[in-house]
Amino acid sequence: MISLDGVTVTAGSSTLLRDVSLAIDAGTWCTVVGPNGAGKTTLVAAVAGLRRPAHGQVRIDGQDLHELHERDRARLVAFVPQHPEVPAGMSVGEYVALGRVAFHGVLRAPSRRDRDVVDGVLERLELEGFRGRDCASLSGGERQRMVLARALAQATKVVVLDEPTTGLDVRHQMDILEMLTKEVLECGLTVLATLHDLTLAGLFTDRLVLLHRGEVRLDGAAHEVIRSRELAECYGTTLRVVNVDGSDVVVPVRGDTGR
């Protein structure tokens, strides 16, 4: 479903991604991890069509993403940024309905099909009761659900998310990730995400890609990457993996402080 072939992304004289090749199957969840500055946000931005590679190609469903018109691209992939901007004075229902603009255009009214899609997404994400609420009145968890709802309203086969749990407490982190898992399992959605929390990444992800200095250091099943020697090396710290009720929990270990 998602294919990156020798993708290199530059900014001035800096190389942000170097010769990255990945193939992500339909209906799976792949999460990119790595230390700050590894190139995670650049990678997902390239897959979302927001960063054009200097070299290489990004394809979704066999189509070269960067050769498509913006409207056609929006029908293939939806993007949830780390810090989404929400227009002032807009209701939740109006915001989620923006996900259908790629289908009916800016100047045409939404069709019955568009309205049905929005209704279905609001129901699945338990936002129906928030339809008329001002976006500015939502809590952090409610706001993140709304942003995810807009992405799902695009009805794309692929959703790309950059740190979707940023700023959320533990409960709301779990809520968002459980919702995404349900979309993958029940709707066949393909998810590419970045996450800072290694425990959550291992818990919810089919596959992990470890980036370091713009290059792929490791790519494999979540439990293999979480327990790898390369993970601690890339983060530059000692990590201990503890099994809790069958799940891997990643614990940073303090160095010798002399106390």
Image: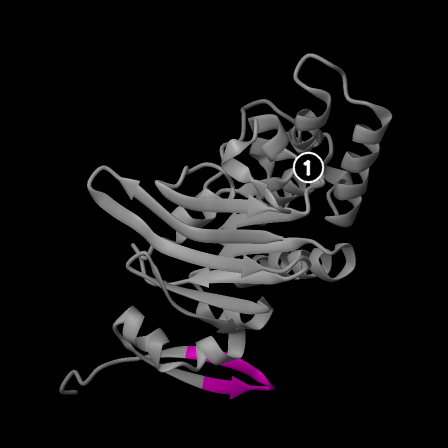
| Residue 136 sits in quarter | top right
Q: Which residue is mark 1?
A: 154
Query: x and y percent of residue 182 in the render?
Result: 72, 60
Q: Magenta stretch: dominant SS?
A: strand
| Residue 11 sits in quarter | top left
- Asked whether the viewer can see residue 174, the reply is no
Which amino acid type is marked by label 1? Gln
Q: How is the image coloured?
A: one colour
Query: x and y percent of residue 255 in the render?
Result: 22, 82
Query: In percent of the image, x 44 and y 82: which residue is there?
Result: 227
| Residue 46 sits in quarter | top left
| 160 drawn magenta | no
Query: x and y percent of residue 190 in the render?
Result: 64, 54
Q: Nearer the viewer, residue 168 or 20?
A: 20
Q: Is 145 situated left or right of 21 in this image? A: right
Rendered position, 191 above or below 56: below
Rendered position, 35 above or below 129: below
Query: In percent of the image, x 68 and y 19: which residue is there?
Result: 105
From this viewpoint, which residue is outermost toward the left?
258
What is the count of numbered marks? 1
Q: In this picture, which residue range is highlighted in magenta?
A: 242-250
Query: In percent of the image, x 49 and y 38: which residue is there?
Result: 49
Rendered position, 83 above or below 110: below
Query: x and y percent of residue 174 in the render?
Result: 60, 62
